[in-house]
Image: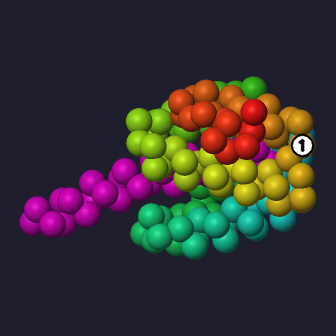
Amino acid sequence: MFGNLFNKAKKVQNKNVMEAIVAGALLTAAADGTIERSETDKLTKLLQANDLLEAFRGREITKTISKYENILDADFGIGKKKMLDEIADIADNDDHAQEVLLTMLAIAKADGEVEPEEHTVIMEVCRTLRLDPKEYGLA
């Protein structure tokens, strides 16, 4: 009984991490005005390879990506606020915060360079997560 309850609690916590990672990655992808298919494909691969998120495969990941894409597409300002709120939910856990930031960096570097708009968003997320951008070669 307690094992089952523990597993459910862990899945809820990990869902917050998954949502924060998706939010950060899509916020980065949308920073230049367009979320490219290559960026969402890379995000899906990164999420599927993340052991922390092994409980979320296929449909649940795709559904979250689609939901957050739609929010950002409907209105970037409102979407950005929503994404930052999702990211802030995991700010108290350094490991989870680093997962979010490192995924954002991977998405930003997917086309070979970090665009200025992507850098701006990443720096804002560093502040939200209370991470030192210098530790990630950003400052």
Per the image, is 20 magenta?
yes
Q: Is residue 69 visible?
A: no
Q: Main secondary structure of the magenta part?
A: helix
The stretch drawn in magenta includes residue 71: no
Image-quadrant location for residue 43: bottom right
The amino acid pointed to by label 1 is: Glu
Viewed as shown, does residue 69 lie left or right of 2?
Answer: right
Residue at 55 percent across and 48 percent down: it is 98
- In the image, is residue 93 above or below residue 65? above
Q: Which image quarter is the C terminus in? A: top right
Q: Residue at x 75, y 39 (%)?
A: 138
In depth, the one of 14 and 73 nearer the eye is: 14
Helix, strand, or loop for circle 1?
loop
Please say whether residue 113 is visible from this viewpoint: yes
Image coordinates for residue 17, horizontal then vertical, percent:
48, 51
Quarter of the picture containing the N terminus is: bottom left
Q: Which residues are magenta?
A: 1-29
Q: Which residue is mark 1?
A: 115
Asked whether, in this view, residue 109 is left or right of residue 57, the answer is right
Residue 21 at x, y percent in the picture: 59, 51
